[in-house]
Amino acid sequence: MQDKPDNSPFHLGDILKKIVRKGGAQKKALAGRRLAQKALSEMLGPLSPHASVASVKTGVVTIEADSSSMFQELEGFQKEKLIDTFRAAGLQVREVRVRLAQK
């Protein structure tokens, strides 16, 4: 937090409001990630153990693939279907990024 211009102390209530708001945003992000993971798992079916949602941030879903072949499948052939799947699940997605998971 930044100091107030007049250098007066912060009120505890103001600090707590900011903490609560941030906690709410984190819960919302976690819910979005869970929703995206469920949609991804349903789309991939038996291949779902080979990919996971790493993050969901401001319209961008990042997926980690556990192998180069899964990476290529998602990045090269399934990208538009992924976007459509996430949108159908209720997520506001404008981009899907796929990366190879670090081992």
Image (spheres, helix red, strand yellow):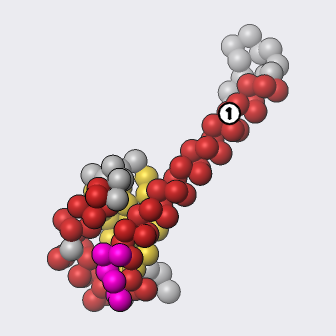
Q: Nearer the viewer, residue 13 or 89?
A: 89
Where does the image place residue 65, in percent across and percent down from the top left? Answer: 38, 80
Vertical side of 18 occupied by 102: above or below: below
Does the magenta stretch mainly form a helix, a strand or a loop?
helix
Which residue has dot 1 on it? 18
In this image, 46 relative to 78: left or right?
Answer: right
Is residue 48 found left or right of 83 in the rendered image?
right
Identify the image quadrant of residue 45: bottom left
Above or below, comparing residue 22 to residue 91 in the picture: above
Q: Please report the residue visible at 80 percent of the width from the left and 14 percent of the height from the top.
A: 8
Magenta part of the protein: which range? 42-47
Instruction: Left or right? Give the position of 2 relative to 84.
Output: right
Q: Is residue 55 at all visible to an observer of this figure?
A: no
| Residue at disc 1, secondary structure | helix
Q: Amino acid at mark 1?
A: Lys
Q: Position of residue 51 (x, y in %)?
A: 39, 80
* Residue 43 painted magenta: yes
- Kindly identify the residue that appears in the image at 30 percent across and 75 percent down: 43
Q: Is residue 101 left or right of residue 76?
A: right
Q: Quadrant of residue 69?
A: bottom left
Q: How many marks?
A: 1
Residue 56 at x, y = what percent?
43, 57
| Mark 1 nearby-residue class (10 Å; few <14, some 14–19, many ≥20) | few
**For the point 74% across and 10% down, which residue is it?**
6
Q: Quadrant of the N terminus?
A: top right
Residue depicted at x 54% and y 57%: 30
In the rendered view, tell whether residue 58 sits above or below residue 66: above
Residue 12 makes an appearance in the image: yes
**Residue 58 covered by magenta stretch:** no
Residue 73 x, y percent position in the rendering = 23, 82
In-front residue for pair 101/34: 34
